[in-house]
Amino acid sequence: MTEFEKMQQGLPYSPADPELTQFRFASRRLCQELNAVDPADTDKQDMVITKLFARRGKGVVIEAPFTCTYGMNLNLGNNVAFGPNCTVIDSGHIEIGNNVLIGPAVGLYTTTQGLLPLEQQNGDNEISLPIIIGNNVVIGGNSVIKAGVSIGEGAVIDAGSVVEGDVEHLPLSRGIRRP
């Protein structure tokens, strides 16, 4: 089994693997290109975004600077907006629904690492877990969404939050409706 396959299946893998390194380099190049595009050149932005991500819907807005590890593990719905300075560690799968606003300096981190000395000495020291973000979600600036988290439809994450566990959706019967 390749390190890429291990990474995709949530098994311990070595991020130093040459194939994974090449994937990261390709993503960095595309992120650099995206960040250098004139903000008024939406056609060029769309072209780079299409190359960078596995899937992206209509109305995706990404403010520079933006970085992601692989891009190929990131699926974006319609009307998704990232504020500036967002960092996405997409070693694991990330699914973002429709009508999602992600504030500035938000981090989405799918990777966990071994904390014990023996785990760090072994080359297979990372595990990636998915992040799922439902429709109509707002994530406030400077928030961190950690590996393995699901955020339900209509949820609002306050600025500066560290989300370590699942966030339930907001029932419409409560009268709370978020864009």
Image (cartoon, rainbow, N blue to C red):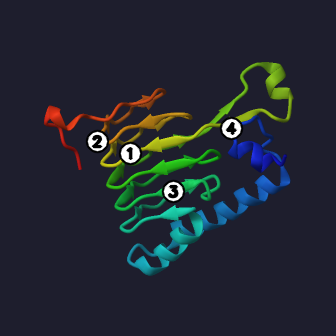
Hey, which quadrant is residue 60 in on the image? bottom left
Q: Do the residues under discs 3 and 1 have CB atoms within 8 angstroms? A: no
Disc 4: which residue: 10
At label 3, which amino acid type do we have?
Answer: Asn
Hey, which quadrant is residue 99 in on the image? bottom left
Q: How far apart are marks 3 and 1 (CA)?
A: 12 Å
Q: Which disc is residue 95 wearing?
A: none
- Determine crowd level at label 1: few under 14, some 14-19, many 20+ residues with C-alpha closer than 10 A: many
Q: Earlier in the sequence, mark 3 or mark 2?
A: 3
Disc 3: which residue: 75
Q: Which of marks 4 and 3 is nearer the N terminus?
A: 4
- Left or right of 39? Residue 17 is right
SS category of the residue bearing label 3: strand
Q: Distance between the residues labelled 4 and 1?
A: 21 Å
From the top left corner, tell me how far across and down residue 144 is, in percent: 47, 36
Q: Distance between the residues labelled 4 and 2?
A: 27 Å
Which residue is more in the foreground, 11 or 104?
Answer: 11
Q: Do the residues under discs 2 and 1 have CB atoms within 8 angstroms? A: yes
Q: Which of marks 2 and 1 is nearer the N terminus?
A: 1
Hey, which quadrant is residue 155 in on the image? top left
At label 2, which amino acid type do we have?
Answer: Gly
Q: Residue furthest front?
A: 173
Task: Report the residue at 23% width, 34% height from top.
Answer: 171
At label 1, which amino acid type do we have?
Answer: Gly
Task: Report the residue at 76% width, 50% height from top.
Answer: 4
- Left or right of 161? Residue 136 is left
Disc 2: which residue: 154
